[in-house]
Image: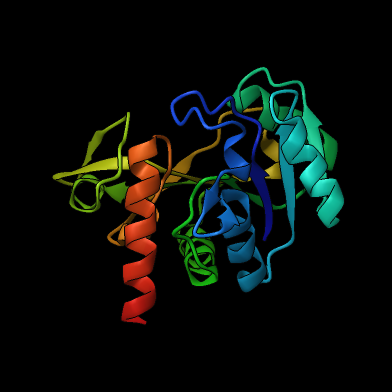
Amino acid sequence: MFVIVMAGGKGTRLNMGEKPLVSLLHQPLLEWVLDSCREAHFPFLVATSTYTPYTANYCRTHGYSQYQTQGNGYISDLVEVLREVDVAGPVMTIVSDLAGLRGSHLQLIEQEYHKAGEEACSVWVLQRLCVEHGFSYSCIEKHNGEQIVPAGINVLHGSAFDREQKEFRFVADDPSFACNINTPSDLLSASRFLKQSENAS
């Protein structure tokens, strides 16, 4: 499955410069996400913007496929990229600060997406896992009696990006999907979580 990594936001809540390049355990946040793509054997493109010129330069230096958008907002930037890459099949979009992801998580999303048979899929995580592991969230909904928050991952059909697509909700009961870094506190929580995960493996 083709992946677009969204790396063009302003990162104002973290306020540490360009968020994709902020270091977590001696590695840029962007690289944690790209590692998961490589582990899943999913080709990827990094969508930068006018707000993340150093990230764009980082991608060029490392030979990563990237497209610099106008930086008019997440949805607008995504549509701009989809028009450019012209992918006919399903496309996975991932924000560039999901450091807990591994290739197996992306492969699981792909499997659940195809099993559901809908055009689109939104990925959510149980809110209690965010609270338990110290990760912030700004949106919450109720689903099958559980409080859930968006994980920052979606799948949509590339040939139909210009219209609303019927979607399937995949709700993850796995704290790796909660590791979404938006604040300095999230960065500390991510460091603890990743160290614990490494020790447990």
Image point (80%, 32%), residue name? 68
Image point (50%, 67%), residue name? 102
Q: Considering only vertical position in the picture, is 140 above or below 167?
A: above
Of residues 180 and 83, which is closer to you in this image? 180
Image point (71%, 52%), residue name? 89
User: Can you name the residue that lies furthest to the top here?
Assistant: 72
Of residues 19 and 145, which is closer to you in this image? 19
Image point (86%, 56%), residue name? 63
Residue 42 percent location from the top left of the image: 68, 65
Residue 70 percent location from the top left of the image: 76, 21
Q: Is residue 90 visible?
A: yes
Among the 4 quarters of the image, the one containing residue 35: bottom right
Residue 76 percent location from the top left of the image: 66, 22
- Tell me: 16 left or right of 67: left
**Which quadrant is the N terminus positioned in?**
bottom right
Among the 4 quarters of the image, the one containing residue 17: top right
Q: Considering only vertical position in the picture, is 121 above or below 1?
A: above
Specify how the rendered protein is coloured. Answer: rainbow
- Tell me: 104 left or right of 132: right
